[in-house]
Image (spheres, rainbow, N blue to C red):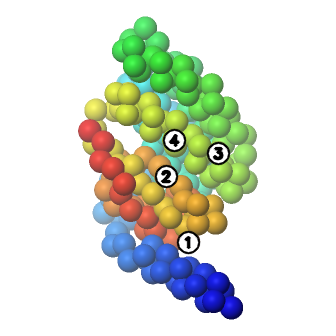
Amino acid sequence: MKITILSMAMAMLLFAACNSGTKTDNNSMATDTVKTGASEETKAAGTSTSGVVTVCLELKNALTKDDDKTAAQAGNSLVEAIAAVDKTSLTAEQSKVFRDVADDAKEHAEHIGSNAGNIKHQREHFETLSQEIYDLVKAGGSTGQKLYYDNCPMYNDGKGGNWLSETKEIQNPYLGKGMPTCGSVKEELN
């Protein structure tokens, strides 16, 4: 009985914590627009890892809107962005991390791309993909912009999930429109 009461209390605390974030007006956020396919920014980034990060952010934005079709398009674009990285332009550390994550990241992106209509499955693959892209960014492979490493404590039955974001405002890709502001910033990356 005590365990049940304690579990209910913990669930209520998590729910309250996730709902305490500030609400934002989607119309006021320029970065809120989800692009279909490879964006102009991605094409401009060319063969660097910044193109990978840019497409990953597009994927995150699609998932925040529960848009499985645009997420699938971004997943397919991510496969292309990973394949287009010029490995000779990477530093030794970036090259090592890229070699470590590229095949897995590509596989997760392929799953996301082939699963339009199954957003739950897309989100499962996005969770692992997010960690791999985070590792790449930490090795110095960012877009040259400030990024945020966010966490949702409620995703995956309370195990949580992390993701990269281009905005400080929480836009949750795991819970989407159901709880768009659930989460917090864990780390700011330059």
Tell me, yes or no, whether the two marked residues, 4 and 1, touch with CB atoms within 8 Å.
no
Report the quarter where the N terminus lies: bottom right
Distance, label 1 to label 2, CA atoms, is 17 Å
Residue 53 percent across, percent down from the top left: 43, 35
Q: Earlier in the sequence, mark 1 or mark 2?
A: 2
At label 4, counting other C-alpha atoms closer than 10 Å, the crowd grade (few under 14, some 14-19, many 20 or more) is some
> Are the residues at dot 2 and dot 3 in contact (C-beta closer than 8 Å)?
no
> Circles 4 and 3: CB distance less than 8 Å?
no
Where does residue 124 sit, x and y in percent of width and height? 65, 50
> Label 3's element?
helix
Most foreground residue, 189 or 170: 189
Check disc 2 and report the residue beneath it. Answer: 162
Q: Which residue is mark 3?
A: 125
Going from N to C along the chain, the mark reached first, 2 or 3, is: 3
Question: Which mark, residue 131?
Answer: 4
Amino acid type of the residue tagged 1 in the rendering: Gly
Helix, strand or loop at mark 1 = helix
Q: Which residue is mark 1?
A: 178
Q: Say which element carries label 2.
A: strand
Q: Residue at x 63, y 25 (%)?
A: 103
Mark 3 → mark 1, Cα distance in angstroms: 19 Å
Going 46% across and 68% down the picture, which residue do you hit?
A: 182
> Foreground mark, 1 or 2?
2
Quadrant the C terminus occupies: top left
Q: Verify CB contact (< 8 Å) between mark 2 and mark 4.
A: yes
Looking at the picture, which amino acid does disc 2 mark? Asn
Q: Nearer the viewer, residue 55 or 147?
A: 147
